[in-house]
Image: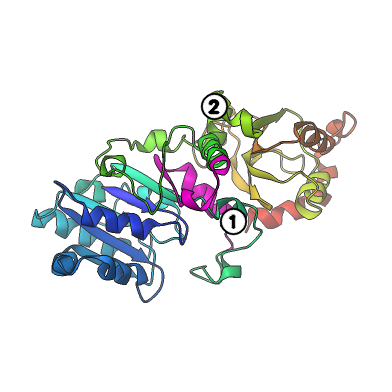
Amino acid sequence: MTVLSGFLGAGKTTLLNRILNNQQEYKVAVIVNDMAELNIDADLIRGATAAQQVTMVQEQLVELSNGCICCTLRQDLIQEVAEMAAAGRFDYLLIESTGISEPLPVAATFHMPDASGNTMDKYATIDTMVTVVDASNFMADCESCHLLLDRHLASTASDQRTIPHLLIDQIEFANVLVLNKIDLVGTEDVKKLKAILTILNPGAHLVTSTHCNVPLDVVLNTKRFDLDKASLAAGWKQELLGEAHTPESDEFGIATFVYRATRAFHPQKLWMQVLEQSKLPVVLRSKGFFWIASHPNTAWEWSTAGTHRHFKVYGQYHKQGTAGVQQQQTNYHEQKLVFIGVHLDKSEIQRMLDACLVSDEESSLEASHWQQWGCLWDSLSTA
């Protein structure tokens, strides 16, 4: 099974149509998920398919609309996949997820048991996670400060995701990246975009295309997907693990920088400098873990994409030095932040963050001193 992801307009439906019209030896069934009540992508697939294939497409095309296949439509997805597997008429499944969905929850859906204890990988296993990237709009979207709500793309009024965060999430979890619409940008821009995508996801197989014209063996039956490897595929995680990034990125000024410190951040200084006044240089992506003096037993997750910054509680530190809620390795009381960007001002990032650390004198203060600043961060821990 292949899962197609990508932001709206990137070319997912174009790629899906190419697969349907050039199946070779594959009998492909398709599930199209749209958050709206009317599934426009399904209509486009029908409209773009040759007349003699319309009946066949109607039989193999399943629409799951007005909800998300990871939650509200999950039971529908399980049922459809089980029925397709039982019918025995298809040997490959293609899921086109909505343009505002993240690949990780879709993949996790296939490994989560339902009320009866069954998982969907009993009927179908994930072979490839493909993300289509729009070469002509990627940089502008990454530099945008828009929420999905600002563009009327959010599924609910409570959806506070930003467009840059969604784009980066879609890229980081894929194991195949299709950089589409390269005919709309210059040669040097294509090289730069390829370098950026490679540093964001070093392990992904990257191909370029015009109108999503890629060989089928790039997106079908690749045997590339591994859930454990995919969860560590993001470039920032590779940096924390000490993996070297690709030297080709140096040509375009694309670099990474890992900030480390053992001393706590001052809760007020970090809040004012980074969250409230946004004095930290804007980068393409930064992520990691940190701790603050007012919450010494709490591990916080740091995440930025473009101009948007998002901090939240990650877990509680264990005595042996692991932040425990999500079972991921986090050294006890250490700041570990990875920055990825073009022409990174590493010295300024270092200077700014060092200035937010507690001083020698402050590090010896009683815990009660820090509680006056704790309420700022408590608002994030309950968000």
Disc 2, SS:
loop
Query: In this figure, which residue is indicated by the disc labeled 2?
Result: 246
Residue type at tag 2: Thr
Residue type at tag 1: Asp
Query: Which image quarter: residue 81?
Result: bottom left
| Mark 2 burial class by Cα count in 10 Å: few <14, some 14-19, many 20+ | few
Residue 247's place in the image compared with 378, above or below, is above
Which is nearer the eye, 242 or 74?
A: 242
Disc 1, SS:
helix
Where is residue 131? Give x, y as percent. 41, 48
Find the distance from the CA under tag 2 to the CA under tag 1: 24 Å
Residue 200's place in the image compared with 169, above or below, is above
| Mark 1 burial class by Cα count in 10 Å: few <14, some 14-19, many 20+ | some
- Cβ–Cβ under 8 Å for marks 2 and 1: no
Residue at position x 25%, y 47% in the image:
1
Where is residue 68? Give x, y as percent. 39, 64
Residue reaching furthest to the right: 361
Query: In this figure, which residue is indicated by the disc labeled 1?
Result: 141
Q: Residue 306 carries which label?
A: none
Residue at position x 86%, y 35% in the image:
365
Check residue 138 for magenta coloring: no
The image quadrant where one finds the C terminus is: bottom right
Sequence-earlier tag: 2 or 1: 1
Check residue 168 for magenta coloring: yes
Per the rendered image, the range of residues in magenta is 160-189
